[in-house]
Amino acid sequence: MESAVRRLHALQRSTTNVRNVCVLAHVDHGKTTLSDGLIAHNGFISRRQAGRMRFMDFLEDEQKRGITMKSAGISLLYTPRRRGDADAEDAEDARAPILITLVDSPGHVDFCSEVSTAARLSDGCLVVVDVVEGVCVQTHAVLRQAWEERLKPCLVFNKLDRLIVELGYSPLETYEKIRGLIHEVNGLMSAFESEKFISRVDTFLHNETRREESGHGDDLETSTSDYLEEDEASMHDGVDEEDAFSVARGNVAFGSAIDGWAFRPDEFVELYAGKLGCSESALRKALSGDWYFHPKTRKIVSRKVANGKLKPLFVQCILDPIWKLYATAESEKNGEWVEKDLATLAKALKVDIPEKDLAQSDRRMALQSVMRAWLPMSPCLLEMITQCIPGPREAAPRRVNRVLPQPVLRKARPSGVDDARRAVMECDSSPEAMKIVFVSKMMAVPRSHVQGAEREQGGEEMKFLAFARVYSGVVQKGDKVFVLHSGHDPSDYDSETIEEVILDELYLMMGQGMFAVDEVPAGNLLAIGGLESVVLKSATLSSSAECPPFGDMMFQAAAIVKVAIEPENVTDMDALIQGLRLLNRADAFVEVSLMDTGEHVIAAAGEVHLERCVADLRERFARVPIRVSPPIISFRETVTSVATASSTTANGRLTISCTVKPMSNFIIRVVDDSADQLKVLLEGKMDEEGEENKKLAREFMEKLAAAREASTYDEQGPEGICEDTFRSAWVLGPKRVGSNVLNVGTYTADVDDDEKEFGHATAAISLGLRKEYDPEELDEATLNATDFDINAAQGSVLTGFQMATDRGPLCDEPLTGVCMKLNLALNPRDEGAGDQDEQFGPLSGQIINTVRDAIRRAVMKAGTRLVEAMYLAVITTTSEALGGTYAVLGKRRSQILSETIREGTGVFVIHAYLPVASSFGFVDQLRAQTSGASTAQLVFSHWSTMDIDPFFTPTTEEEREEFGEDGDVGPNIARQLMDSVRRRKGLKVEEKIVQVATKQRTLARKA
């Protein structure tokens, strides 16, 4: 292994011949099996173990569950195959060894953060799709992740053997299904480009609906080849240049990872061009489109000429031979007579296979030997990576704006900012270039896997390493670099507060092993030791403090599943706290916090992720017995109508009136999804000219317009609603980027009854909806005529607004989707009053409490509702288990969206919205109720306002008959959820309690 490491390390110096690739897919679509096959190509594992060993899944829980939970990288060597038609000199250049760094990532939605860390460090990706299951919800998610990170994707259709063996598809049926899937994926990428759908769930449901309306997923593509001429030149027009994936471009492959074979149509061009008497370029186009070979005229013709009597060339030249091999193996397995056995077919294909492999009693194993010799998977996919995925230098201009966005600057732009961007854009690997490294996550690795880091007596078993990539310069052992976090301002920093570290440990990642190296040039991935004390989750390392920080990681889900953790023995509290620190560093997504009550809370993406975190805490980090509380559910609060309420300061000097109204749902979604963008817009100055600000503001308003266009008619609202919502916006909340808007209000002084504008339309100006604020709009002479400084009160008003939106009146959960306007009225001063500050406290504190109280009162009057988080549940089940599946869904307040049958399989796919509050234990109950016949994937979808009023009281005769005199007939789910949250937080709960049950009596029954 060490000799291989030395050779791989030597290849890092040639940036042109480096490829950084991550493998993305839905869970169980074959990523890790495919990765095993590529690793076997370098001899690190046996070809027979590929797909069974799961080399990249080295955690015990990964092997036990059979799913990938942590992303891991490995360096592979590939020497391109020589092409027969290439010039000798060109062929020699083309056969230069290629260093491919492969990063395997999880497919389960609960571990989406690992996908984000892998995608950030890569330049391209292999998107693996199971041809039987098709494009699933997590396939949509990883495609969007790749698009957001500006990766160059390649598509791999896996498990073609299932279509042959399990479903009995014919080659022609397979061809039609593949065409439909390619068209579906291309449609998905087009939707991302147009930003027609804001969330990935919207896109997924739209494509599912379109597939149902078309009858099935196989006829989605309308081929343009029906209208093409029959000559070879016309075939060049058959490729849609806008499609992200095209067989003609070579970025689509087909195969079976478990059987170890894969192909691209290019593999067959040389073989058939001479036989068919056409040029290789023409045949390459024909194999990638809807073209046919006419045996009489010996010409390639279109579908119109074929008239349904001929097979497409793709079927005739590629799929038919594969189907014949599988049919022969199946017949031999069943003891049936075959005209040509596998050995004869292998000889006809001119593949050399040892007799012992062909003579195996397990005919599937014999078939695998033939297929691996004829269409080996590893060279096919590695060559596709080499040809279709750019090297670091070529990919850098495409990705620089995503990975290194324009920084938020408080002062003049330093020259180091432009130098850093130029170095990253050029992927400058010269020794004198600025050293820039991005750490996407910290990972806990067993010391036994790290070269030279053997465990000392009584030392830690785990070692923390940074999962990183060099974007510029050459990082050498002993280099001193600055650690720059996301809030770093290159124009305004204190050099004494920036941490400096010396990089003493650099490693080349080889899956389970980490091998020490002395230097790593730009464009390569590496692991770095010794950063655990200065890097929490991610950071930028640079030789210059003027380097801007890299952009924040983009995660697919939100940490909405929370539990409180405590040790069983109170003396273990210190060990638990230290374990929580280590867990927070080791997991890129988990959130660890300390509540006001003193509870330690961890937040995860879902149940499986939470189980993994708790297990890590028990077994790896804290190593003490711990108790886990019931899940803590996150809610939000909102309003459904317009209302006004007022409150007066304790000294009676100021009356504050608040008017609230609801915001459109699509605006709430866009604001939530654009939190990072709004943070840059509203909290910092990016450049003196403000061009970047204007660009971000324009993009935000375009997102709002696109979301309105995609919304239902009832949700769209009047024309110009987007601009009207933010035209007078002063600030957003909570945390200054939330989905609540405080508009500019009014102020009335006791010396003048005229209303004056109160506040600054700061947010509206940042969004480009108003011009710069004119101070003359405030009549300073009038305001100064009183003893009340209205300008000084603005800070207190903003603080009160942020506090009110952070904790709503129902159960202290954040407000969402509320527009507010405050009106301040100054009351006459009581001349007989003494020092009111001494009596009631500082006026600033009184204003904060009054603003908060006025907002809470207005919200309570405006039809307050709970807002709960919703999962999109994608359930696969059989016809026999449908009843049990619907029974489980019915008990958990789910909303069924659709039920479809997967063609040719007898498998039903159900899409439903499931409240997060009702989701705990759902998967286990579903398996138990259906005897394991049903499986479910839960992905966070949206926040949904509950229709039920938690304070509902019957008012009409019909309501009293249906719900009882006090509305207590039947459960009020909203009230139950609200009370459970209030009870958990120690807030007052209104409920009837039987104090002495033995004294309860029924009325005497009289005869």
Image: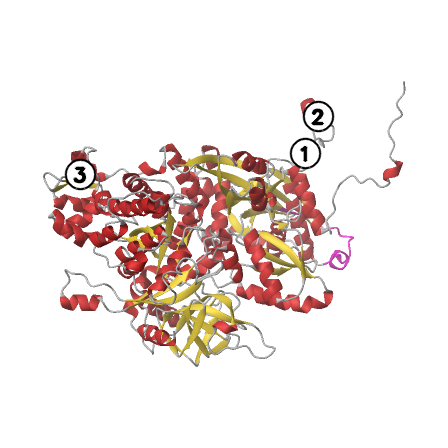
Tell which residue pokes out farthest to the bottom in this image. 478
* Relative depth, front residue between 189 and 637: 189
Question: Does dot 1 land on a helix, a strand or a loop?
Answer: loop
* Relative depth, front residue between 631 and 168: 168
Circles 1, 2 touching at the beta carbon (< 8 Å): no
Q: Residue at x 68, y 41 (%)?
A: 976
Question: Does dot 3 land on a helix, a strand or a loop?
Answer: strand
Start and end of the magenta stretch?
Answer: 824-841
- Sequence-wise first label, 1 or 2: 1
- Sequence-wise first label, 1 or 3: 3
- The amino acid at mark 2 is Arg
- The amino acid at mark 1 is Phe
Task: In the rendered structure, find residue 899 and report the number of the disc placed on it.
Answer: none
- Sequence-wise first label, 3 or 2: 3
**Distance from label 1 to label 2 (Cα)?**
11 Å
Q: Is residue 522 visible?
A: yes
Give percent across and percent down for residue 827: 69, 47
Is residue 225 highlighted in magenta?
A: no
Give the number of the mark in front: 3 or 2. Answer: 3
**Circle 3 sits on which residue?**
302
Q: Tell whether 514 sits left or right of 395.
A: right
Q: Is residue 727 visible?
A: no
- The amino acid at mark 3 is Ser
Question: Does dot 2 land on a helix, a strand or a loop?
Answer: helix
**Circle 2 sits on which residue?**
960
Q: Residue at x 40, y 46 (%)?
A: 702
Q: How many marks do you count on the picture?
A: 3
**Circle 1 sits on which residue?**
952
Give percent across and percent down for residue 581: 59, 66
Name the quadrant of the C terminus: top right
**Distance from label 1 to label 3 (Cα)?**
67 Å
**Distance from label 3 to label 2 (Cα)?**
71 Å
